[in-house]
Image (cartoon, rainbow, N blue to C red):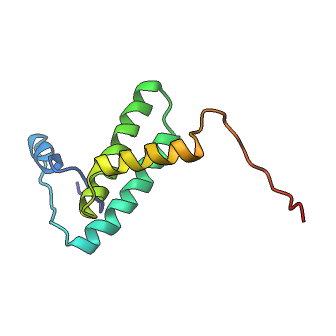
Amino acid sequence: MVKIYDKLVRDNVPEIIKRQHEKPIYRSMGQEEFRRELFRKLKEECNEVENATSREELIEELGDVLEVLKAIASLEDAHFSEVIESAQEKKLIKGGFEKRIYLEKTISRK
């Protein structure tokens, strides 16, 4: 039986598949394809976060999103610590999401 995946997977997945007595067919991607697939993977993982049905599943899926974000940062020659620092700076200026504010519209005073 053949299962088609056609997607970016974590580094150890081929070995895991082999241990399950299956033969993985895979290849290494070039930089541009890898970048494109990382963004595709990010969307996939975000959908899985949204559809999580338990706390444990939510935490696992958030971890997957985090791992993809780290890979994107690394690919773009950014240290993940820079991403965290940028998020903290933006939070100081614009705040976080604790107040659950939903902006409906603005009205010009002119």
State whether residue 38 is above or below residue 11. Answer: below
**Picture residue at 35% right of the left edge, 44% below the top:** 66
State whether residue 43 is above or below residue 89. Answer: below
Left or right for 41, reference 54: left
Q: Residue furthest right?
A: 110
Q: Can residue 93 be seen in this view?
A: yes
Q: Position of residue 48 (x, y in %)?
A: 45, 44
Left or right for 49, reference 63: right
Q: Position of residue 65 (x, y in %)?
A: 38, 46
Residue closer to the observer: 23 or 99: 99
State whether residue 35 is above or below residue 93. Answer: below
Q: Where is residue 94 in the image (x, y as percent from the top left)?
A: 59, 46
| Res. 107 image quadrant | bottom right
Q: Residue furthest top?
A: 55
State whether residue 95 is above or below residue 54. Answer: below
Total count of labels: 0
| Res. 19 image quadrant | top left
**Picture residue at 24% right of the left edge, 62% below the top:** 77
Q: Quadrant of the N terminus?
A: bottom left
Residue closer to the observer: 77 or 16: 77
Residue closer to the observer: 40 or 107: 107
Q: Quadrant of the C terminus?
A: bottom right
Q: Can residue 3 be seen in this view?
A: no
Left or right for 104, reference 77: right
Q: Position of residue 72 (x, y in %)?
A: 31, 58
**Picture residue at 59% right of the left edge, 38% below the top:** 97
**Picture residue at 29% right of the left edge, 63% below the top:** 6
